[in-house]
Image: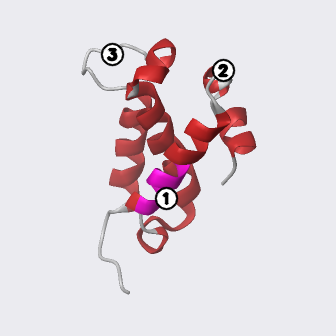
Amino acid sequence: MSVKNFLKRFPEFENTEAKLIEMALAESEEEMSSSYWGALFETASYYLAAHKLAISPMGESCRLQTQSEKTIYQLEYERLRKSSFIGAHVI
């Protein structure tokens, strides 16, 4: 995962320091298991990182208001999580 690819998907974070994006991406990867997420790991990691950035004090300009009081990034992350964790997993 790279800052460059993250910004291609989320250009609204273009004015965010690269170091902050790197930290959010690293946190997202640490909180998730690629063995559970499978092919959705990178996509979900980007959405979780975007959510983390949006709720940070530096991300105020990227926050999008929704009726559920969640960022759009969080809503998509949760949708991906539900679709990824359906059924049993064998480790």
User: What is the distance, in whole Å, between disc 3 and disc 2 at their CAs?
Assistant: 23 Å
Give the Cα separation between the discs numbered 2 and 1. 22 Å
Side (left or right) of 14 relative to 40 = right
Q: Give the x, y percent position of residue 4.
A: 75, 41
* Callout 1 amino acid: Glu
Element marked by disc 1: helix
Helix, strand or loop at label 2? It is loop
What residue is rendered at 38% in x and 87% in y?
91
Q: Compared with residue 1, is residue 90 higher up or lower down, i.e. above or below? A: below
Q: Amino acid at mark 2?
A: Asn
Asked whether the residues under the numbered discs 3 and 2 touch, taking CB atoms below 8 Å apart as contact, a structural biologist would say no
Q: Position of residue 25 (x, y in %)?
A: 54, 48
Check if residue 27 falls in the magenta segment.
Answer: yes
**Residue count near mark 3 (Cα–Cα under 10 Å), binned few <14, some 14–19, many ≥20:** few
Q: Nearer the viewer, residue 17 or 29?
A: 17
Which label's residue is closer to the chain start, 2 or 1?
A: 2
Q: Tag 2: Cα neighbours inside 10 Å, few (<14), some, or many (≥20)?
A: few
Magenta residues, start to end: 25-30
Q: Position of residue 50 (x, y in %)?
A: 50, 35
Residue at the disc numbered 3? 66
Tell me, for residue 29, which label it has, or none.
Answer: 1
| Residue 15 tag number | 2
The residues bearing labels 1 and 3 have C-alpha atoms spaced at a distance of 26 Å
Q: Secondary structure at mark 3?
A: loop
Quick one: 40 or 45, which is closer to the camera? Answer: 45
In the rendered image, residue 37, in percent from the top left (x then y), is placed at: 45, 64
* Quadrant including the N terminus: bottom right
